[in-house]
Amino acid sequence: MRTVYSLALVAMVVATTGAAQKFMTAFGSFRNNGIIKDSLFPLKGDPKYPVLDVNSEDMVCRADMSYHPTPFQIYSDDTLFLQFDMDIAANVISEDKKGQNIWGPCIVYMAEATANMSNLKWFKIFEYAGDKNRWCSEAIPSEGAVLQIPMKKNLKTGYYVVRAEVIGLNMADDLHTPGSILGAQYYPSCGLIAFTNVHNRTKVPETTVSIPGVYKATDPSLLLKAGIFNTKAISYTIPGPAEFDRPKIGHPNITLRPELLN
């Protein structure tokens, strides 16, 4: 029987009203058949605000990378589950400083871990913008959904940093300027896994990217001149590199099956 794992994506903060709201995505834990293990890099800074400067080092993981968590074991035949909080919708910081639902894609990268977790070389393992009705970011937290991500069956064994992000496009009709909240808003967080390829395959990505560096503020996918209301998820071009070892037929998608995590 195939084992499934989940990375809960939960970050709770208290707003000025005293009510709990979720302003950003963050791994809560890795899970395996009811066993919960903290294999996460601790977030730094105030979690209710996204990363706004696309060239900031916080784009990497927005975390203290000097803390090396115990890696979580996962295998090439396993499925990785990323779960959002099921009760509270994600919010993005808007011009009036009130929370709005995030509208934007979900992207997951991996990088082979280095001794000091610096100069990581990233490759994309998952991307999803949404369908004709809603963005990926809307589907997950509002429905209690999870992202199902089959692990790459050809990837070589090793230790990897897993980086998940949601990009909020609500304010992306203008470029970010210092002191403003304009521009695309980034919500990254990272965990550490020990990946074992049970088929002894040793494929590595032919190309990798640097973070920061993978995005430019003027990328058409990040500077929506037509505005978010005139941009449809189903026709949106997701920024960044092509997905590593992407399946030729079919692709993981949003699945509304949180009961799998019990």
Image: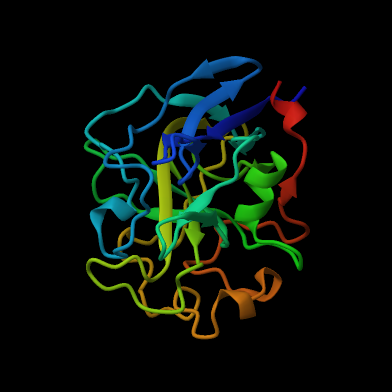
Residue plotted at (44% across, 62% down): 94
Q: Nearer the viewer, residue 232 or 37?
A: 232
Occupied quadrant, residue 40? top left
The residue that appears at 70% across and 61% down in the rendered structure is: 134
Left or right of residue 34: residue 214: left
Name which residue lies at 42% across and 67% down: 184
The residue depicted at 34 percent of the width and 25 percent of the height is 69
**Would you say residue 37 is visible in this rendering?**
yes
Task: Name the image quarter holding the N terminus.
Answer: top right
50 displayed left or right of 66 = right
Residue 93 spot, x, y in % from top left? 43, 57
**Residue 218 image offset from top left, x and y in percent:** 38, 80
Of 257 and 116, the residue lying toward us: 257
Q: Residue 11, how many percent across, how many down?
A: 46, 36
Closer to the camera, 231 or 83?
231
Q: In the rendered view, tell whether residue 70 sits above or below residue 40.
A: above
Left or right of residue 262: residue 106: left
Residue 160 visible in the displayed image: no
Vertical arrangement, residue 44 with respect to residue 229, above or below: above
- Using the image, determine if residue 228 lies above or below residue 78: below
Residue 188 position, x and y percent, is 41, 49
Which quarter shows the C terminus? top right
